[in-house]
């Protein structure tokens, strides 16, 4: 397995400690491989984020998209093997990013090399958009590249993102959409005082409890056949000095909404604002939009991906929108049908992240078959 081209390329990417948004040399490796097989390469580096757009051929466009950045390894004592070395044991490959998503990127590149060897004069356009900031803020990543492409009137017909969508075996789950995500930093203001004299103080925690209780009981929507109902979660609450005899002067609460296509971020903000204004306390709220929801209902891409998965694993994939956000929304803005298909996600962001080596081979074959069905 160690001499396999996909594993070798995955190894080259894993040894680059590309903790978001640091690319650590990954994209130089990828651009070099693509340039050797005739791709036109356009680096689009913005701030501390590295991006590139690459294409081969003209006509109907199929783009493969992904990210070279990874999350931090965490406590090294929790790792059986060094996180930034690719270790092979009993058919499993271990390393930070092997599942999310350097293994899938390697599978894409090798698939493109095989594809162009067979079809050097294919009819459509094969493209890659790779960023080094998907795990972080993403501020200077895919969204900025897509803005640039749209400004010069670029369009996409199909986009396949290599996020780790699979549950137990490669291809058993694909994603045709994702929920949106919007966060809020809520500061509730009170008046600090001695805890034995509450009449001389104003407790912001008590104010926050009341409004949070109402928000948690709110039914934001009922979802639809593709998305679960919109969900609000409280991710952080901070107040006080740690002393048991002081009423704090302010309380900080961090909220997150994962929302479906039934809602917009504007409606969420409006309903939260209306709820807050029903209470008699001072507050400040700052919103941060992360991703909007997207959905690919039907089309040639989803038909081809389902057919391809059925061929290789003899099972019809589940088509879901579960999990976190992705860059899919940005590609929808270019007019593309968007599908996500990648490796098993059971260990992503965990210590001892790993995938089956055989899954890399199957995934690369799937990617090549999708190229052959869409742009030959």
Image (cartoon, helix red, strand yellow):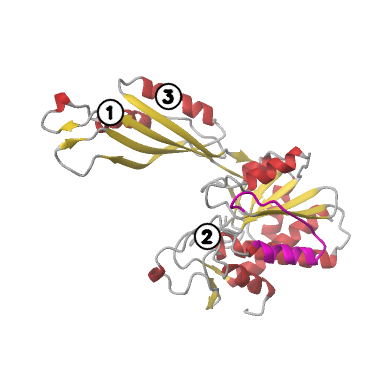
Specify start and end residues of the magenta stretch as a single range. Answer: 27-49
Query: In the image shown, does 342 or 325 lie closer to the viewer?
Result: 325
Tell me the CA gap for discs 3 and 2.
36 Å
Asked if residue 150 is positioned above or below residue 266 in the image, the reply reads below
Q: Position of residue 11 (x, y in %)?
A: 60, 72
Q: Which residue is mark 3?
A: 273
Q: Which residue in the rendered view is the most extreme toward the right?
A: 121
Q: Quadrant of residue 54?
A: bottom right
Residue 263 visible (yes or no): no
Pair 1/2: label in front: 2
Q: Residues within 10 Å of mark 2 (few under 14, many from 20)?
A: many
In the rendered structure, does residue 38 fall within the stretch colored magenta? Answer: yes
Q: Which residue is mark 2?
A: 19
Left/right of residue 347 with respect to residue 343 in the rendered view: left
Query: In the image shown, does 373 or 331 lie closer to the viewer?
Result: 331
- Quadrant (top left, top right, bottom left, bottom right) of the N terminus: bottom right
Q: Which residue is mark 1?
A: 207
Residue 373 visible (yes or no): yes
Tell me the CA gap for discs 1 and 2.
39 Å
Left/right of residue 345 with respect to residue 123 in the rendered view: left
Q: Which residue in the rendered view is the most extreme toward the front?
A: 47
Q: Position of residue 8 (x, y in %)?
A: 65, 74
Mark 1 and mark 2 lie on one chain; the one further toward the N terminus is 2
């Amino acid at each position: 397995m160690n001499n396999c081209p996909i594993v070798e390329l995955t190894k080259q990417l894993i040894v680059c400690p590309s903790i978001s948004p640091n690319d650590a040399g990954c994209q130089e490796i990828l651009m070099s491989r693509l340039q050797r097989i005739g791709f036109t390469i356009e680096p689009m580096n913005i701030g501390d984020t590295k991006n590139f757009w690459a294409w081969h051929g003209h006509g109907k466009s199929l783009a493969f998209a992904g990210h070279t950045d990874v999350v931090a390894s965490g406590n090294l004592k929790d790792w059986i093997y060094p996180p930034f070395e690719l270790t092979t044991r009993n058919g499993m490959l271990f390393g930070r990013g092997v599942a999310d998503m350097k293994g899938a990127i390697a599978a894409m590149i090798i698939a493109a090399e095989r594809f162009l060897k067979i079809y050097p004069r294919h009819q459509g356009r094969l493209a890659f958009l790779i960023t080094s900031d998907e795990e972080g803020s993403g501020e200077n990543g895919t969204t900025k590249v897509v803005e640039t492409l749209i400004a010069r009137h670029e369009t996409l017909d199909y986009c396949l993102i290599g996020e780790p969508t699979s549950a137990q075996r490669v291809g058993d789950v694909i994603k045709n959409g994702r929920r949106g995500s919007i966060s809020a930093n809520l500061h509730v203001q009170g008046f600090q005082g001695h805890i034995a004299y509450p009449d001389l103080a104003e407790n912001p925690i008590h104010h926050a409890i009341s409004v949070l209780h109402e928000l948690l009981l709110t039914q934001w929507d009922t979802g639809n056949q593709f998305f679960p109902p919109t969900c609000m979660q409280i991710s952080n609450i901070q107040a006080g000095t740690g002393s048991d005899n002081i009423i704090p002067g302010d309380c900080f609460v961090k909220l997150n909404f994962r929302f479906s296509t039934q809602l917009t971020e504007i409606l969420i903000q409006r309903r939260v604002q209306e709820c807050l204004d029903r209470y008699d306390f001072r507050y400040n709220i700052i919103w941060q939009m992360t991703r909007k929801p997207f959905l690919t209902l039907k089309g040639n891409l989803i038909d081809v991906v389902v057919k391809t998965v059925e061929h290789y694993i003899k099972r019809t994939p589940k088509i879901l929108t579960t999990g976190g956000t992705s860059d899919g929304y940005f590609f929808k803005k270019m007019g593309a049908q968007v599908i996500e298909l990648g490796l098993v996600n059971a260990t992503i962001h965990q210590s001892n992240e790993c995938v089956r080596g055989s899954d890399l081979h199957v995934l690369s074959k799937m990617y090549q078959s999708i190229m052959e069905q869409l742009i030959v």
